[in-house]
C-alpha cells in the first residue's frame, strides 16, 4: 500500500498546470493524471482496480447501450458544464428506452494547453452527477491532441442499462390517437447556452435544465407500463424530436401551442433573437407518447416527481402517412412544425 | 422585415446606451436613434438599437378599437 | 411581454375574423400585398390565413432585404473575406446562396473569417479588438436597419477607427413598391392583381406614413400601415377591405402606437448625413431600379468598403429554374416553381426565398400552407 501511495514523486500542479502531450502518451504522466484526477474524483471500485476495462456481472434481461459525444461550447454555462451534460445526456438516452441505466464509460479528448484546474472542475462535476444518479463511471480513456486541434475538451460517454421485460418503448410504436406529453418547460438549456456566448450578450436568469431523468422514467413506467415512445428533445428541440418520431412511426401529430410549457423569459429571449422555442435544445426534459386513456395517469405520475412538476399534455398523434407535425397556434390558426433546417441563427428580419 | 420587439428601459448606462428588459431578459442597446427616452419607457428594439418609443396611449386605443369593432359584430348576430 | 401578447389574443382574433367575414364582399376577391417580410412570417407562423375568408388572398411582396440582394453583392462580400478582411454580418445572410453554390457560411467553413453579429456596435467592437485587421460590416436592410449603420459609421469617424469599413447594400421601400406597381404585370397586363397594401411596420416607424401618400394617389390603391403582430394584420385587413369596398384609396395607420406621420426624424437626419442615393441598384427579381438604394457620402468615404477595396464585378446569376425573381414580384407562388420542394428545400436552398426565414418559399415550406392543401387534396 505504501509503495502505491509513493508512486509519483510530486503531485500534479492542478491549480496552475495545463494539459500537455505527455498526458496522452501512455506513460507515467498519463497514469498520474488518471490517478490524481479521474480515479480520485470518480472514486469507485472499478476504476481503483486500474485496468483498461471494467468487469461486471451481466445483468439479466434485454440490454441497452447508448453513446454520446459532447462538444458544447462554452464548457461552463449557467446551470451546468460539459461534465454534467455528458453524464446526464447518456443516462437519459439509455433511460428513454425505459431501461435502468447501470454503468457509464467516459472518453476524454483533451487539447494541449487546457488548464488542469478547469479539467478538475469538469471531472468533479461529472463525478457529482454520476453519484447523484447512482450510475458509476466504470472505465475511461484519455487522449491529448495538439493545441488548436480541439476545443479544450471533448467528452464521449457510453451508457448501458437493462430494460424490464414488459416494456416495449420505441419511436416506431406511436399510434394514431395516442397522447403526447412533455415533462416540463422547453428551451431553457439552449437559451442558457446562448446567453453565455459572447457575441449575443444578453442577461437572463435562465439556467440550463440539465438533469438525469431515469428516476422520473422509473416512476412513469411503473404507472403506465404501456408507454409507446419516449425521447429527450436535445439538439433541434421539441420540434425535431417530434418530427423524428412521426417519421419513424409513419404518423402525424397535432399539437396545441397554448399547452406547451415555455417560461416567459425563454419566450422573451427567443423573441429578442428571432428564434423559435420549439427548436431550442433541452437537456433535462422528455417527450412521452402513450395511449389516450392512460394520459391522465401518466401526467399525474410525472407531476408527482420533481423533474416532471410542470409536465403537460401537449397534443395527440393522428393518422397521416406524410408525417406532418402540425400545431394549432395560440392565435387560433394552424401551422406546420417542420424539421429544423440548417442551424437556428439569430436574425434581423 | 425588421424584427423589432418592445422592451422596457430599466437602466441608463455609459454614452448613449441603456439596459432594456423584456420579461426579465436584459440587453444593452443604443439610444442613439431616439431622444428623451426615460427609465420606464417602452422602446422598439431592432439590431441592438432603440428605434422608437411606444406610445402607451395609442396602444390602449388600438386594443380598444379592436375590441369595440368585434363587439359590434357580436351585437348584430 | 407587454405590447406583444395583447396583440396575439385568441379571443379578439376570433371576433375580428367574424368582422372580416362580414365585411368581405363574397362576389369579389381581395388581393392584398404585404410588402414586409415580417408580415409574411407573422401570417404563416400564427396561421392567420386560417382565420380569413377564402376570398382574401395574401400576395407576398419583395419586403425581404435578404431575398432581394442580388448574387453579385454576396459574391463581393465573400471576396472581401477571402482577401483577408474580417467580414461581420447579420445572421440572416449566412446561408443565402451566392455563385457556384457558395455562401458566407460555406466560405466560413472553408477558412474565411466571417463573423455573425447582432448589431453594428458588435462590428465596431471587432474592429477595435483587431486593429491589425481590416473589418468590414456587410450592411443590408431597408430603412429600419439603415440608421444603425449610420450611427456606426459616425462613431467610427469620431474614433478614427481606420480599419473599419461598411459594404453598403441598404435599399429603399417606396422605390420597390413603386417598381412593382409600375411593372407591366401589374399596371397593364393585370397578371398580378393587387387591390391594397399592408405598409411595412418598422420601416414606417422610421420614415413615417407620409411617403405612402404618393402611392395611394398615383396608383389609386389603399395602404394601411400595419403592426407586426397577428391582430395588427387582421385589424389592417379589415381596414383595407373597408377602403376597397368604399372605393377609397387612402393611407391609414393601424400601427399608431409606433408610427407617426413624420416618423423618426432624428434617425432620418442621421441617415441623410451619412448616405445618399445611388442612381441605380440591381434588385434580385426586379432588375435595375433607379434611386432605390443608398451609398456612403464623400465625407465618410474613408469607411466605404467599395472605395477601400478592389472588388471585382461578379456576373453571378440565379440558379436555372429558380423562380425567386417572379416570386419576389408577386407574379408567381412558391408552388409554381419547379425547384420548390424537390431540389430546393430549406436544407438545400437554391435561391434566397428559401433561405431567409421571411422568404415566401421558406415561409410556405416551414409553416406549410401548401402541404396542408395537398393533404386536403389527397384526403378528398
Image: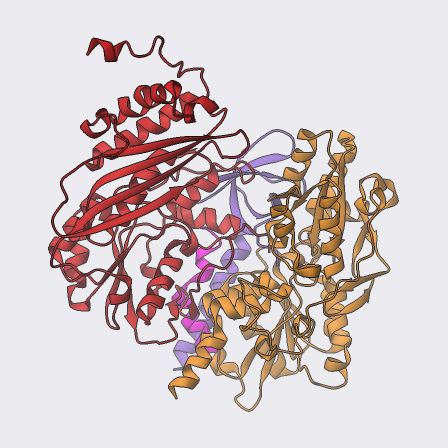
Give percent across and percent down for residue A140. 31, 33
Q: Is residue C376 above or below residue A145?
A: below
Give percent across and percent down for residue C143. 70, 55
**Tag count:** 0
Image check: A68 left or right of C167? Answer: left
Q: Is residue C147 above or below residue A13?
A: below
**Residue C263 quadrant:** bottom right
Give percent across and percent down for residue C86. 69, 40
Colour displayed for chain C in the image of the structure: orange
Q: Residue at x 40, y 65 (%)?
A: A329
Q: Residue at x 34, y 8 (%)?
A: A9
Image check: A325 left or right of C61? Answer: left
Work out whether residue A165 or residue C1 is closer to the camera in this orientation and state it: A165
On the rendered image, what quadrant is the N terminus of chain A found in? top left
**Residue B1 quadrant:** bottom right
Seen as rendered, the residue at the extreme bottom is C27
Work out whether residue C86 or residue A37 is closer to the camera in this orientation and state it: A37
Image check: C352 left or right of C82? Answer: left
Q: Is residue A179 above or below residue B56?
A: below
C78 inside magenta stretch: no
Q: Is residue A16 above or below residue C243?
A: above
What is the magenta segment's predominant secondary structure?
helix
Q: Is residue A81 visible?
A: no
Colour displayed for chain A in the image of the structure: red
C17 inside magenta stretch: yes
Give percent across and percent down for residue C205. 65, 55
Q: Is residue C57 visible?
A: yes
Work out whether residue A257 or residue C313 is closer to the camera in this orientation and state it: C313
Work out whether residue A93 or residue A140 is closer to the camera in this orientation and state it: A140
| Start-end of magenta stretch | C1-19
Q: Which chain is purple?
A: B
On the rendered image, what quadrant is the C terminus of chain A found in? bottom right
Amino acid at each position: 500500500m505504501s509503495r502505491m501511495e509513493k508512486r509519483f514523486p510530486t503531485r500534479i500542479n492542478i491549480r496552475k498546470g495545463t494539459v500537455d502531450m505527455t498526458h496522452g502518451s501512455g506513460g507515467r504522466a498519463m497514469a498520474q493524471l488518471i490517478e490524481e484526477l479521474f480515479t480520485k474524483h470518480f472514486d469507485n471500485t472499478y476504476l481503483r482496480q486500474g485496468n483498461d476495462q471494467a468487469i461486471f456481472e451481466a445483468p439479466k434481461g434485454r440490454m441497452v447501450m447508448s453513446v454520446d459525444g459532447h462538444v458544447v461550447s462554452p464548457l461552463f454555462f449557467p446551470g451546468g458544464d460539459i461534465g454534467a451534460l455528458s453524464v446526464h445526456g447518456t443516462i437519459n438516452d439509455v433511460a428513454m428506452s425505459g431501461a435502468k441505466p447501470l454503468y457509464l464509460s467516459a472518453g476524454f479528448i483533451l487539447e494541449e494547453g487546457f488548464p488542469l484546474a478547469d479539467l478538475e472542475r469538469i471531472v468533479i462535476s461529472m463525478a457529482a452527477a454520476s453519484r447523484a444518479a447512482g450510475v458509476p463511471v466504470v472505465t475511461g480513456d484519455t487522449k491529448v491532441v495538439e493545441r488548436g486541434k480541439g476545443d479544450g475538451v471533448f467528452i464521449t460517454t457510453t451508457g448501458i442499462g437493462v430494460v424490464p421485460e414488459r416494456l416495449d418503448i420505441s419511436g416506431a410504436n406511436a399510434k394514431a390517437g395516442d397522447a403526447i406529453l412533455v415533462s416540463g418547460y422547453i428551451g431553457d438549456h439552449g437559451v442558457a447556452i446562448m446567453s453565455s456566448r459572447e457575441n449575443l450578450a444578453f442577461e437572463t436568469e435562465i439556467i440550463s435544465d440539465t438533469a438525469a431523468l431515469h428516476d422520473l422514467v422509473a416512476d412513469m413506467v411503473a404507472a403506465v407500463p404501456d408507454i409507446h415512445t419516449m425521447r429527450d428533445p436535445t439538439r433541434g428541440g421539441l420540434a425535431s424530436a417530434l418530427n423524428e418520431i412521426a417519421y419513424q412511426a409513419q404518423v402525424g401529430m397535432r399539437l396545441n401551442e397554448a399547452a406547451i410549457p415555455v417560461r416567459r423569459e425563454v419566450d422573451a429571449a427567443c423573441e429578442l433573437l428571432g428564434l423559435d422555442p420549439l427548436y431550442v435544445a433541452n437537456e433535462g426534459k422528455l417527450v412521452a407518447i402513450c395511449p389516450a386513456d392512460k394520459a391522465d395517469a401518466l401526467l399525474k405520475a410525472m407531476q408527482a416527481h420533481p423533474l416532471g412538476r410542470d409536465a403537460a399534455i401537449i397534443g395527440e398523434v393522428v393518422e397521416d402517412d406524410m408525417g406532418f407535425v402540425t400545431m394549432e397556434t395560440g392565435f387560433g390558426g394552424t401551422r406546420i412544425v417542420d424539421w429544423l433546417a440548417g442551424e437556428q441563427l439569430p436574425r434581423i428580419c | 422585415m425588421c424584427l423589432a420587439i418592445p422592451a422596457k428601459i430599466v437602466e441608463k448606462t455609459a454614452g448613449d446606451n441603456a439596459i432594456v428588459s423584456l420579461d426579465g431578459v436584459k440587453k444593452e442597446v443604443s439610444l442613439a436613434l431616439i431622444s428623451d427616452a426615460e427609465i420606464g419607457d417602452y422602446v422598439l428594439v431592432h439590431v441592438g438599437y432603440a428605434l422608437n418609443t411606444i406610445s402607451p396611449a395609442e396602444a390602449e386605443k388600438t386594443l380598444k378599437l379592436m375590441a369595440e369593432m368585434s363587439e359590434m359584430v357580436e351585437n348584430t348576430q | 411581454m407587454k405590447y406583444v401578447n395583447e396583440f396575439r389574443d385568441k379571443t379578439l382574433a376570433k371576433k375580428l375574423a367574424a368582422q372580416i367575414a362580414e365585411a368581405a364582399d363574397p362576389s369579389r376577391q381581395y388581393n392584398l400585398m404585404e410588402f414586409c417580410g415580417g408580415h409574411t412570417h407573422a401570417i404563416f407562423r400564427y396561421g392567420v390565413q386560417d382565420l380569413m375568408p377564402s376570398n382574401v388572398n395574401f400576395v407576398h411582396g419583395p419586403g425581404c432585404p435578404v431575398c432581394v440582394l442580388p448574387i453579385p453583392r454576396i459574391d463581393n462580400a465573400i471576396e472581401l473575406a477571402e482577401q483577408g478582411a474580417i467580414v461581420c454580418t447579420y445572421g440572416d445572410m449566412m446561408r443565402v446562396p451566392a455563385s457556384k453554390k457558395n455562401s458566407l457560411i460555406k466560405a466560413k467553413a472553408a477558412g474565411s473569417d466571417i463573423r455573425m453579429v447582432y448589431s453594428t456596435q458588435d462590428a465596431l467592437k471587432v474592429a477595435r479588438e483587431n486593429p491589425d485587421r481590416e473589418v468590414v460590416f456587410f450592411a443590408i436592410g431597408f430603412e429600419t436597419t439603415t440608421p444603425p449603420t449610420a450611427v456606426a459609421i459616425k462613431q467610427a469617424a469620431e474614433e478614427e477607427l481606420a480599419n473599419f469599413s461598411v459594404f453598403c447594400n441598404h435599399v429603399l421601400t417606396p422605390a420597390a413598391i413603386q417598381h412593382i406597381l409600375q411593372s407591366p404585370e401589374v399596371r397593364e397586363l393585370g397578371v398580378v392583381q393587387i387591390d391594397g397594401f399592408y405598409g411595412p411596420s418598422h420601416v414606417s416607424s422610421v420614415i413615417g406614413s407620409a411617403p405612402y401618400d404618393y402611392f395611394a394617389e398615383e396608383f389609386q390603391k389603399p395602404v394601411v400601415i400595419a403592426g407586426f403582430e397577428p391582430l395588427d394584420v387582421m385589424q389592417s385587413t379589415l381596414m383595407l377591405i373597408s377602403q376597397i369596398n368604399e372605393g377609397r384609396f387612402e393611407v391609414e395607420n393601424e400601427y399608431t402606437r409606433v408610427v407617426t406621420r413624420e416618423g423618426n426624424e432624428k434617425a432620418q437626419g442621421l441617415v441623410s448625413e451619412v448616405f445618399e442615393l445611388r442612381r441605380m441598384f440591381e434588385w434580385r427579381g426586379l432588375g435595375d431600379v433607379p434611386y432605390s438604394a443608398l451609398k456612403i457620402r464623400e465625407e465618410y468615404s474613408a469607411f466605404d468598403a467599395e472605395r477601400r477595396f478592389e472588388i471585382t464585378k461578379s456576373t453571378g446569376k440565379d440558379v436555372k429554374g429558380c423562380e425567386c425573381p417572379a416570386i419576389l414580384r408577386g407574379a408567381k407562388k412558391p408552388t409554381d416553381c419547379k425547384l420548390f420542394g424537390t431540389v430546393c428545400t430549406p436544407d438545400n436552398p437554391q435561391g434566397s426565398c428559401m433561405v431567409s426565414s421571411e422568404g415566401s418559399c421558406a415561409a410556405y415550406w416551414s409553416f406549410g400552407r401548401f402541404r396542408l392543401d395537398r393533404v386536403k387534396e389527397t384526403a378528398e
